[in-house]
Amino acid sequence: MIHLQQALWSGRFSAGMDDSTLAFTSSLDVDSHLAFYDVMGSLAHVRMLKKCGVIPAEDADSIVAGLKDILTKVEDGTFEFDHSLEDVHTCIEFSLTEAIGPAGGKLHTGRSRNDQVATDFRMYLRDEALRAAEAVNGLMMALVKVAEDNGDAVMPGFTHMQHAQPVTLAQHMLAHAFRFSRDADRFLDAFRRMDKCPLGCAALAGTTYPIDRRMTAEALGFREPTENSMDSVSDRDFVTELAYCAAQTAVHLSSLCEELVLWSSQEFGFIEMDDRYTTGSSIMPQKKNPDIAELVRGKTGAVVGALMTMITMTKGLPLTYNRDLQEDKRPVMESMATVIASAQIMSKVVATTTFHRDRMLEVTSRGQINATDLADYLVTKGVPFREAHGIVGAAVRHSIDTGRNLEDMDLEELRTFSDRIEEDVYDVLPVVRCVERRNSYGGTSPQSTDIQISKAIEQIMVRDEVIRQENQLIQNCWKALRD
Ligand code: ARG
């Protein structure tokens, strides 16, 4: 049987495409999600063809009218994708020609599906990059809010998962916040790099028609056209780059989630998550499980997998378009959707979690966590740091043997380790003092975290404004193309 697909391009073929060939080569399940962008790309293209006199004005007008009807159907979900055709581009072009007659056949003048798909996917991922930046910005804000509300709460800071030095909860939350700040920036950086339009590069070599690529680029909200036609139909860097941005964000989300899971355990008892964002057990009535955090942590695998897919899929491909490139969509569409949804729900989890400050403080006071402060104190009394380290090591051993904290020993007992120790040592040993005194730029003191909070809020606000402007620009283009 001759499939519709081949009927369209039948000249070259004598035998029909096998059903299994169509099923195997079809990308419709995935690229039907690009339908909106495909129609917008076509609207821009046909207006340009008209303006440049490449096709007659009346044909262009009837194509525009037909495309607008298709757009309405795509937006209200009634457009019927014909599964005997292999992709969204073919479906839309075929449906147009069915509706308006042979003039529809003029839409594909001066372009190819190769530049078309590259343009569509850029437009799709451009929106996703903005949505991801916005979602990650929101999560960052939720973390900053916890820092603001808990400026002076003290908790253990860990290295190697061992008590290292006391920190403030604010410092810990801000550490996560600044990771997400970089992630949100990365999405916007990737956005800027993908903000060039490949449309009009045609199959690979450009076209003989007097087209105006600047006009289509501008109409679709791109900064400028891409520079080289062969690069443009091959380039999937923008996909890989976003896959990396998503993977790095997922890794950061996973790290945050791992801590929240630990902190909500009976052993830590640092936090309690809100009922709305936890689940129960089918058998153990007492359980309150941190499933959302665990799922976000678990989803990291697939998100990182998408990056591996892209990097491996593009390796060793000769220029220019190869059908391998069709495999770029599903993984990155999914990884972006996962990261956006994860950041959105984690904002709610963080914003509604109760932090048990008393428990954190109580735990911090255990385990000679202020040993570094005692060593630093000895340094201020003229003892070389290496020597001070040894002295305090002996004091720590003694305090473990006698089951007490360093600050619980009286002066006489402390002085058995060094006669440089004086009454003022009690000003440096309490854990609250340990954090107050770590006043270096970027350090954990409340004074320092106040500065960090201002910086974080400024970064969030600057990005929110960039996202707002970019979204506005894109929306204005859609509006103009509909008119
Ligand atoms: N479905 C194809 C893709 O996603 C569109 C481009 C097809 N081009 C071609 N020369 N077969 O890559």
Image (cartoon, rainbow, N blue to C red):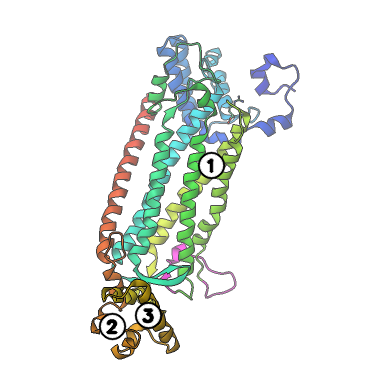
The amino acid type found where label 2 is placed reads Ile
Q: Which residue is mark 2?
A: 421
Residue type at tag 1: Val
* C-beta proximity under 8 Å, tags 2 and 1: no
Mark 1 CB within 8 Å of ligand 1: no
Q: Is residue 235 visible?
A: yes
* Magenta segment includes 277: yes
Q: Nearer the viewer, mark 1 or mark 3?
A: 3
Mark 1 highlights which residue? 332
**Three-letter code for the amino acid on which mark 3 is drawn:** Ile
Ligand 1, seen in the image, is in the quarter at: top right
Residue where numbered disc 3 is placed: 391
Q: Position of residue 139 (x, y in %)?
A: 39, 54
Q: Residue at x 45, y 18 (%)?
A: 46
Q: Is residue 251 above or below residue 28?
A: below
Q: Where does the magenta region start and end? A: 269-287
